[in-house]
Structures are given as C-alpha cells and as structure tokens.
Amino acid sequence: MNASIKRSLAALLLMSFGIASQAQQAQPAPVHSAAVRSLTKEQQGALDKQDQDVAQVAVAIVRLIDQDKAGEVWDQSSPIARQIIARDAFVKKIAHDRAPLGAPGMRMPMGVKHYQYDGTGNMPAGAYLNILFDTQFSQSAQSSREMVTFILDSDNVWRFVGYSVR
C-alpha cells in the first residue's frame, strides 16, 4: 500500500478511536433506534462524526479493492478478520466475486448500520458497523450492493473485518 493511503487509513482509524470510545459509552447495549433517540445532542454529534470517519475509511477500502489491492486491505484488517480468513483466500474470494461484475462505475453511499453481536452464531461478539454502497458495475445490468464491515477491536479502534458484494 502506498504510504499516503496507509497514513490516511491510519489517521482515520486513530481519529475514530476517541469518537468510538465516547459513542460506545453512550450505547452500552445492543443498538436500537430507541437507544439512539435517547442520546444527548453531543453524543449524537460524536456518533455522527464517527460514522462519517468510518465511512471515509470504507470508501478508501473499496477504492483499494477496485485497484486489485485486496491484499493490502487484509493487511490492515482486524486480527479477528485475519483469524477468519487467510490473506490469499480473501484476495481470491474478492477477485472471484468482483470478476463477473466488471469495472465499478457510479457508487452511491447508502448509510451506516450499527450492530451488536453476543457471540452466538457465526459472528464473534462485539460492536460492528456496516457501510453500504449501491454500485453500478460495467458488466451488470443491475446495481450491486457492496458492504464494508468494521468491528470495534479491544483497543477501541474500528478496524476492517469484511467486504461483500451482492
């Protein structure tokens, strides 16, 4: 990964550290709309800023994937992601999923979704953010949905944990 992209990703992840900590204190349990409505104006502002920062990182990630640099994305991922899938398998899966779609064209952000998992099922316990994009690819008549997922690691930093396109 070139140095400027790496610095940008690192800076955005570090910026999200303080915001994530404050937002997590504001939302201690599973994230529901009622919990968000009960936030103070300052807490909601911090949560909105966190979402914007993480969304910027998600844009950088999909651009790296667009440039066939999925391995570099995996290199910066959460330790949990690296336990779930090996680097080569991650790169091959993204190449396999994206190849029939062609080059990405217009990509529209669709928002941020917050999730809290308790560790049952196939997801490790933790707080997650999904950043969604509606993307038009050159070889597909219909737009596709890209999703970039982050987990709040034990050091209170949001880190990449997954990518999918459907």
Image (spheres, rainbow, N blue to C red):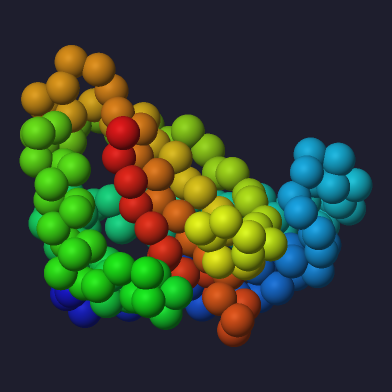
User: Is residue 78 among what the camera can see?
Assistant: no
Residue farthest to the top, as pictured = 141
Q: Is residue 11 left or right of residue 95?
A: right
Query: Which quarter of the rendered picture does the C terminus lie within?
Result: top left
What residue is drawn where x is 12% and y is 51%? 95
Query: Which quarter of the rendered picture does the N terminus lie within?
Result: bottom left
Marker count (numbered) = 0
> In the rendered image, which quarter is residue 74 located in?
bottom left
What residue is drawn where x is 31% and y is 57%? 61
Q: Nearer the viewer, residue 88 or 69?
A: 88
* Residue 39 locus on image (x, y percent): 86, 51
* Residue 127 locus on image (x, y percent): 63, 62
Residue farthest to the bottom, as pictured = 155
What residue is drawn where x is 70% and y is 73%? 21
> In the rendered image, which quarter is residue 57 located in?
bottom left
Residue 6, above or below 118: below
Q: Nearer the viewer, residue 16 or 4?
A: 16
Residue farthest to the front, as pictured = 121
User: Is residue 160 among what the camera can see?
Assistant: yes
Q: Nearer the viewer, residue 13 or 114?
A: 114
* Residue 4 locus on image (x, y percent): 24, 74
What residue is drawn where x is 63% and y is 49%? 114
Q: Is residue 15 left or right of residue 134?
A: right
Q: Is residue 70 left or right of residue 83?
A: left
Q: Is residue 111 left or right of residue 137?
A: right
* Residue 124 locus on image (x, y percent): 55, 66
